[in-house]
Amino acid sequence: MEMSWLRLAFLALLGSCYLPSLILPERVEPEFIFSRPSPRPDPGQFQITGYLPVYSLATVEPSRLEYLTDLVYFAATPEADGSIKISSGRRGEWNRVRQWGQQYQLRLHLGIKDLGDLPYQNSLARIAADPQLRRHFAAQITRTAVKEGFVGVDIDWEYPRGSSLSDFVALLAQLRQMFDPYGLKLSVAVSPYVPLLTESYRYVDQVHLMSYDDSGIHASYEKTRQHLKMILRQVPPEKVVLGLPFYGRIAVEHGTGPALSYRDIIKKLDPGPDRDEAGGYHFNGPKTIGQKTRLARRLGLAGVMIWQLGQDDPGERSLLRAISEINREYFPFVALRPR
Protein backbone atom coordinates (compact mmCIF):
# COMPACT_ATOMS: atom_id res chain seq x y z
CA MET A 1 0.00 0.00 0.00
CA GLU A 2 1.34 3.41 -0.97
CA MET A 3 2.11 5.85 1.84
CA SER A 4 0.04 9.00 1.98
CA TRP A 5 1.79 12.30 1.42
CA LEU A 6 0.92 13.27 5.00
CA ARG A 7 2.67 10.19 6.43
CA LEU A 8 5.72 10.78 4.24
CA ALA A 9 5.92 14.37 5.41
CA PHE A 10 5.70 13.24 9.05
CA LEU A 11 8.55 10.70 8.55
CA ALA A 12 10.70 13.34 6.86
CA LEU A 13 10.13 15.72 9.76
CA LEU A 14 10.94 12.98 12.28
CA GLY A 15 14.16 12.15 10.45
CA SER A 16 15.23 15.78 10.43
CA CYS A 17 14.90 15.86 14.22
CA TYR A 18 17.26 12.95 14.84
CA LEU A 19 19.67 12.99 11.94
CA PRO A 20 21.78 16.00 12.99
CA SER A 21 22.79 14.31 16.25
CA LEU A 22 24.42 11.50 14.24
CA ILE A 23 26.44 13.73 11.91
CA LEU A 24 30.01 14.37 12.94
CA PRO A 25 30.74 18.08 12.46
CA GLU A 26 34.52 17.91 12.63
CA ARG A 27 36.57 17.58 9.47
CA VAL A 28 39.77 15.60 9.09
CA GLU A 29 42.82 17.84 8.90
CA PRO A 30 44.66 17.48 5.55
CA GLU A 31 47.93 16.62 7.31
CA PHE A 32 46.36 13.42 8.64
CA ILE A 33 44.81 12.15 5.40
CA PHE A 34 46.21 8.72 4.51
CA SER A 35 47.49 8.05 0.99
CA ARG A 36 44.39 6.11 -0.05
CA PRO A 37 40.67 6.52 0.71
CA SER A 38 39.54 4.82 3.90
CA PRO A 39 35.87 4.19 4.75
CA ARG A 40 34.77 5.51 8.12
CA PRO A 41 34.27 2.56 10.49
CA ASP A 42 30.88 1.83 11.99
CA PRO A 43 30.69 4.34 14.87
CA GLY A 44 29.27 1.65 17.12
CA GLN A 45 32.43 -0.42 16.64
CA PHE A 46 34.87 2.15 17.97
CA GLN A 47 37.10 0.13 20.27
CA ILE A 48 38.02 0.97 23.82
CA THR A 49 40.77 -1.50 24.66
CA GLY A 50 42.32 -1.82 28.09
CA TYR A 51 45.57 -3.56 28.98
CA LEU A 52 45.41 -5.49 32.24
CA PRO A 53 48.78 -6.77 33.51
CA VAL A 54 48.50 -9.75 35.79
CA TYR A 55 50.05 -7.74 38.62
CA SER A 56 47.20 -5.18 38.48
CA LEU A 57 44.31 -7.58 38.98
CA ALA A 58 44.00 -6.56 42.61
CA THR A 59 43.78 -2.82 41.88
CA VAL A 60 41.40 -2.73 38.91
CA GLU A 61 37.83 -1.67 39.67
CA PRO A 62 35.67 -4.34 37.93
CA SER A 63 32.67 -2.03 37.42
CA ARG A 64 34.85 0.19 35.20
CA LEU A 65 35.16 -2.66 32.70
CA GLU A 66 31.68 -1.86 31.41
CA TYR A 67 33.26 1.03 29.48
CA LEU A 68 35.50 -1.34 27.46
CA THR A 69 34.95 -3.33 24.30
CA ASP A 70 38.25 -5.25 24.47
CA LEU A 71 40.64 -6.37 27.22
CA VAL A 72 44.26 -7.44 26.73
CA TYR A 73 45.29 -9.84 29.49
CA PHE A 74 48.98 -8.95 29.67
CA ALA A 75 50.31 -12.14 31.17
CA ALA A 76 52.57 -14.08 28.79
CA THR A 77 56.25 -13.96 27.84
CA PRO A 78 58.13 -15.91 25.14
CA GLU A 79 60.78 -18.43 26.10
CA ALA A 80 64.01 -18.97 24.17
CA ASP A 81 62.83 -22.41 22.98
CA GLY A 82 59.76 -20.93 21.29
CA SER A 83 57.29 -21.76 24.05
CA ILE A 84 55.31 -19.19 26.00
CA LYS A 85 55.09 -18.73 29.74
CA ILE A 86 52.03 -17.39 31.52
CA SER A 87 53.24 -14.98 34.20
CA SER A 88 50.97 -16.30 36.92
CA GLY A 89 50.70 -19.94 37.80
CA ARG A 90 47.45 -19.37 39.67
CA ARG A 91 44.58 -20.55 37.50
CA GLY A 92 42.11 -18.57 39.56
CA GLU A 93 43.41 -15.27 38.17
CA TRP A 94 42.68 -16.24 34.58
CA ASN A 95 39.28 -17.56 35.62
CA ARG A 96 38.53 -14.16 37.17
CA VAL A 97 39.44 -12.37 33.93
CA ARG A 98 37.34 -14.82 31.93
CA GLN A 99 34.40 -14.17 34.27
CA TRP A 100 34.76 -10.42 33.77
CA GLY A 101 34.84 -10.97 30.02
CA GLN A 102 31.54 -12.82 30.15
CA GLN A 103 29.93 -10.39 32.57
CA TYR A 104 30.84 -7.26 30.59
CA GLN A 105 30.75 -8.85 27.10
CA LEU A 106 34.41 -8.13 26.40
CA ARG A 107 36.61 -9.50 23.66
CA LEU A 108 39.61 -11.01 25.43
CA HIS A 109 43.11 -10.93 23.91
CA LEU A 110 46.29 -12.56 25.19
CA GLY A 111 49.10 -10.03 25.61
CA ILE A 112 52.66 -11.28 24.98
CA LYS A 113 55.49 -9.03 26.11
CA ASP A 114 59.20 -9.06 25.38
CA LEU A 115 61.15 -6.15 26.81
CA GLY A 116 64.18 -6.91 24.69
CA ASP A 117 66.18 -4.04 26.15
CA LEU A 118 66.31 -6.02 29.41
CA PRO A 119 68.87 -8.85 29.63
CA TYR A 120 66.38 -11.40 30.96
CA GLN A 121 63.82 -10.75 28.22
CA ASN A 122 65.19 -11.03 24.71
CA SER A 123 63.67 -14.25 23.43
CA LEU A 124 61.74 -12.86 20.46
CA ALA A 125 64.93 -11.84 18.67
CA ARG A 126 66.12 -15.44 18.68
CA ILE A 127 62.70 -16.88 17.86
CA ALA A 128 62.05 -14.50 14.97
CA ALA A 129 65.44 -15.26 13.37
CA ASP A 130 64.94 -19.04 13.30
CA PRO A 131 62.29 -20.55 10.94
CA GLN A 132 61.82 -23.64 13.11
CA LEU A 133 61.40 -21.59 16.31
CA ARG A 134 59.00 -19.25 14.50
CA ARG A 135 56.75 -22.17 13.57
CA HIS A 136 56.89 -23.62 17.07
CA PHE A 137 56.16 -20.26 18.69
CA ALA A 138 53.22 -19.58 16.36
CA ALA A 139 51.81 -23.05 17.01
CA GLN A 140 52.14 -22.61 20.78
CA ILE A 141 50.35 -19.25 20.76
CA THR A 142 47.59 -20.51 18.47
CA ARG A 143 46.99 -23.57 20.63
CA THR A 144 46.85 -21.49 23.82
CA ALA A 145 44.54 -18.82 22.38
CA VAL A 146 42.09 -21.36 20.97
CA LYS A 147 42.09 -23.53 24.11
CA GLU A 148 41.60 -20.61 26.51
CA GLY A 149 38.99 -18.76 24.46
CA PHE A 150 40.94 -15.64 23.46
CA VAL A 151 39.73 -13.86 20.31
CA GLY A 152 43.22 -12.58 19.50
CA VAL A 153 46.82 -12.05 20.52
CA ASP A 154 48.75 -8.81 21.05
CA ILE A 155 52.55 -8.75 20.64
CA ASP A 156 54.47 -6.09 22.56
CA TRP A 157 58.14 -6.37 21.55
CA GLU A 158 60.21 -3.47 22.90
CA TYR A 159 61.96 -3.20 20.53
CA PRO A 160 63.07 -4.99 17.35
CA ARG A 161 66.07 -3.28 15.75
CA GLY A 162 68.47 -3.97 12.89
CA SER A 163 68.01 -7.42 11.34
CA SER A 164 65.27 -8.18 13.89
CA LEU A 165 62.95 -5.84 11.99
CA SER A 166 62.86 -8.09 8.92
CA ASP A 167 62.78 -11.18 11.16
CA PHE A 168 59.69 -9.75 12.85
CA VAL A 169 57.99 -9.49 9.45
CA ALA A 170 58.58 -13.22 8.97
CA LEU A 171 57.25 -13.99 12.45
CA LEU A 172 54.09 -11.94 11.91
CA ALA A 173 53.53 -13.68 8.57
CA GLN A 174 53.85 -17.06 10.33
CA LEU A 175 51.38 -16.01 13.01
CA ARG A 176 48.94 -14.74 10.39
CA GLN A 177 49.07 -18.08 8.58
CA MET A 178 48.42 -20.00 11.81
CA PHE A 179 45.70 -17.63 13.07
CA ASP A 180 43.53 -17.37 9.97
CA PRO A 181 41.93 -20.85 10.11
CA TYR A 182 40.72 -20.06 13.64
CA GLY A 183 39.69 -16.46 13.00
CA LEU A 184 42.14 -15.12 15.59
CA LYS A 185 43.04 -11.42 15.54
CA LEU A 186 46.64 -10.21 15.61
CA SER A 187 47.78 -6.84 16.94
CA VAL A 188 51.14 -5.26 17.71
CA ALA A 189 52.10 -2.51 20.15
CA VAL A 190 54.37 0.03 18.46
CA SER A 191 56.32 3.05 19.64
CA PRO A 192 56.21 6.05 17.26
CA TYR A 193 59.96 6.39 17.85
CA VAL A 194 60.79 2.78 16.92
CA PRO A 195 58.52 2.00 13.93
CA LEU A 196 58.34 -1.40 12.28
CA LEU A 197 59.00 -2.03 8.60
CA THR A 198 55.93 -1.07 6.56
CA GLU A 199 55.56 -4.66 5.35
CA SER A 200 54.95 -5.76 8.96
CA TYR A 201 51.60 -4.04 9.04
CA ARG A 202 50.24 -6.20 6.20
CA TYR A 203 49.93 -9.13 8.56
CA VAL A 204 48.26 -7.48 11.55
CA ASP A 205 44.68 -6.47 12.18
CA GLN A 206 45.56 -3.56 14.43
CA VAL A 207 48.45 -1.38 15.52
CA HIS A 208 48.39 -0.16 19.12
CA LEU A 209 50.25 3.15 19.04
CA MET A 210 52.10 3.73 22.33
CA SER A 211 51.73 7.50 22.25
CA TYR A 212 53.50 8.18 25.54
CA ASP A 213 56.85 7.92 27.39
CA ASP A 214 58.30 10.91 25.56
CA SER A 215 61.42 12.76 26.62
CA GLY A 216 60.55 16.08 28.21
CA ILE A 217 56.81 16.51 28.76
CA HIS A 218 55.19 13.09 28.60
CA ALA A 219 52.16 12.35 26.37
CA SER A 220 50.99 15.88 25.57
CA TYR A 221 48.18 16.42 23.06
CA GLU A 222 50.60 18.09 20.65
CA LYS A 223 52.98 15.12 20.76
CA THR A 224 50.10 12.73 20.16
CA ARG A 225 49.24 14.62 16.97
CA GLN A 226 52.87 14.25 15.88
CA HIS A 227 52.87 10.54 16.68
CA LEU A 228 49.72 10.00 14.63
CA LYS A 229 51.15 11.82 11.62
CA MET A 230 54.16 9.51 11.81
CA ILE A 231 52.24 6.23 12.02
CA LEU A 232 49.63 7.21 9.42
CA ARG A 233 52.39 7.40 6.82
CA GLN A 234 52.68 3.61 7.14
CA VAL A 235 49.32 2.35 8.41
CA PRO A 236 45.74 3.11 7.32
CA PRO A 237 43.70 4.80 10.05
CA GLU A 238 41.19 1.96 10.41
CA LYS A 239 44.04 -0.23 11.73
CA VAL A 240 45.38 2.27 14.27
CA VAL A 241 44.39 2.21 17.95
CA LEU A 242 45.58 5.30 19.81
CA GLY A 243 47.31 4.61 23.12
CA LEU A 244 46.35 6.72 26.15
CA PRO A 245 48.46 6.69 29.34
CA PHE A 246 46.80 6.31 32.72
CA TYR A 247 49.94 7.51 34.49
CA GLY A 248 52.20 10.54 34.66
CA ARG A 249 55.93 11.13 34.44
CA ILE A 250 58.30 13.78 35.70
CA ALA A 251 59.82 15.61 32.75
CA VAL A 252 63.49 14.93 32.05
CA GLU A 253 65.61 16.13 29.14
CA HIS A 254 66.74 12.67 28.02
CA GLY A 255 64.89 9.39 28.45
CA THR A 256 61.85 9.05 30.67
CA GLY A 257 61.39 10.31 34.21
CA PRO A 258 59.88 8.60 37.27
CA ALA A 259 56.25 7.50 36.86
CA LEU A 260 53.17 7.72 39.07
CA SER A 261 49.77 6.19 38.31
CA TYR A 262 46.84 8.51 37.62
CA ARG A 263 45.11 6.84 40.55
CA ASP A 264 47.91 7.93 42.91
CA ILE A 265 48.16 11.38 41.33
CA ILE A 266 44.51 11.97 42.21
CA LYS A 267 44.92 10.52 45.67
CA LYS A 268 48.13 12.33 46.61
CA LEU A 269 48.08 15.55 44.57
CA ASP A 270 44.36 16.16 43.87
CA PRO A 271 44.63 18.11 40.57
CA GLY A 272 41.60 19.66 38.89
CA PRO A 273 39.98 18.01 35.84
CA ASP A 274 41.57 20.54 33.47
CA ARG A 275 45.08 20.00 34.82
CA ASP A 276 47.78 17.91 33.14
CA GLU A 277 50.52 18.62 35.68
CA ALA A 278 50.75 18.27 39.44
CA GLY A 279 53.71 17.89 41.76
CA GLY A 280 56.06 17.85 38.77
CA TYR A 281 54.23 14.93 37.12
CA HIS A 282 52.89 15.41 33.60
CA PHE A 283 49.82 13.28 32.84
CA ASN A 284 46.54 13.30 30.90
CA GLY A 285 43.56 14.52 32.88
CA PRO A 286 39.92 14.00 31.83
CA LYS A 287 39.92 17.04 29.53
CA THR A 288 43.00 15.93 27.56
CA ILE A 289 41.83 12.32 27.45
CA GLY A 290 38.57 13.60 25.99
CA GLN A 291 40.42 15.68 23.37
CA LYS A 292 42.50 12.69 22.33
CA THR A 293 39.41 10.47 22.09
CA ARG A 294 37.72 13.06 19.88
CA LEU A 295 40.83 13.19 17.69
CA ALA A 296 40.76 9.40 17.29
CA ARG A 297 37.07 9.54 16.31
CA ARG A 298 37.62 12.44 13.93
CA LEU A 299 40.45 10.65 12.11
CA GLY A 300 38.49 7.43 11.72
CA LEU A 301 40.85 5.38 13.87
CA ALA A 302 39.89 1.90 15.05
CA GLY A 303 39.72 3.09 18.63
CA VAL A 304 41.77 3.93 21.70
CA MET A 305 43.71 1.74 24.11
CA ILE A 306 44.71 2.26 27.71
CA TRP A 307 47.91 1.46 29.52
CA GLN A 308 46.82 0.32 31.99
CA LEU A 309 43.50 -0.40 33.73
CA GLY A 310 44.83 -0.76 37.27
CA GLN A 311 46.03 2.87 37.17
CA ASP A 312 42.63 4.51 36.72
CA ASP A 313 40.94 6.46 39.50
CA PRO A 314 38.10 4.35 40.95
CA GLY A 315 35.96 7.41 41.69
CA GLU A 316 34.27 10.24 39.82
CA ARG A 317 37.44 11.32 38.01
CA SER A 318 37.85 8.02 36.16
CA LEU A 319 39.58 8.44 32.78
CA LEU A 320 37.71 5.43 31.41
CA ARG A 321 34.47 7.23 32.17
CA ALA A 322 35.77 10.33 30.34
CA ILE A 323 36.51 8.21 27.24
CA SER A 324 33.08 6.61 27.36
CA GLU A 325 31.31 9.97 27.63
CA ILE A 326 33.07 11.29 24.52
CA ASN A 327 32.29 8.10 22.60
CA ARG A 328 28.61 8.38 23.45
CA GLU A 329 28.53 11.92 22.06
CA TYR A 330 29.38 10.51 18.65
CA PHE A 331 26.88 7.66 18.55
CA PRO A 332 24.56 7.79 21.56
CA PHE A 333 22.11 5.11 20.37
CA VAL A 334 24.61 2.25 19.96
CA ALA A 335 25.82 0.14 22.88
CA LEU A 336 29.56 0.33 23.42
CA ARG A 337 30.06 -3.38 24.02
CA PRO A 338 30.59 -5.80 21.10
CA ARG A 339 27.75 -8.10 20.12
Image: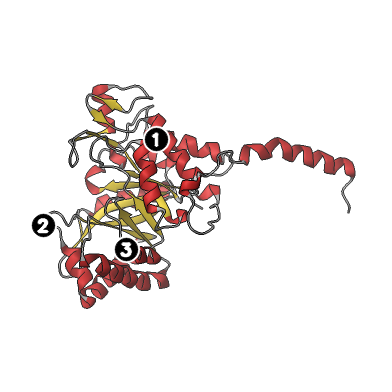
From the viewer's perspective, tell me whether residue 113 is left or right of residue 4: left
Q: Quadrant of residue 287?
A: top left
Q: Mark 2, mark 3: which one is toward the viewer?
A: 3
Q: Which residue is mark 2?
A: 120
Q: Do the residues under discs 2 and 1 have CB atoms within 8 angstroms?
A: no
- Secondary structure state at the residue bearing disc 2: loop
Residue ID at (27%, 50%): 193
In this rendering, would 278 be left or right of 11?
left
Question: Helix, strand or loop at disc 3?
Answer: loop
Q: Residue furthest front?
A: 31
Disc 1: which residue: 289
Task: Looking at the image, tell me whether mark 2 or mark 3 is earlier in sequence order.
Answer: 2
Q: Amino acid at mark 3?
A: Leu
- Cα separation, mark 3 vs mark 1, equals 29 Å
Residue marked by disc 3: 197
* Residue type highlighted by circle 2: Tyr
- Where residue 262 sits: x, y (%)? 28, 32
- Determine the image quadrant of residue 117: bottom left
Foreground label between 3 and 1: 3
| Element under disc 1 | helix
Task: Determine which quarter of the picture holds residue 273.
Answer: top left
At a point 49% along the width and 39% down the height, the residue shown is 327
Q: Distance between the Cα atoms at labels 2 and 1?
A: 34 Å
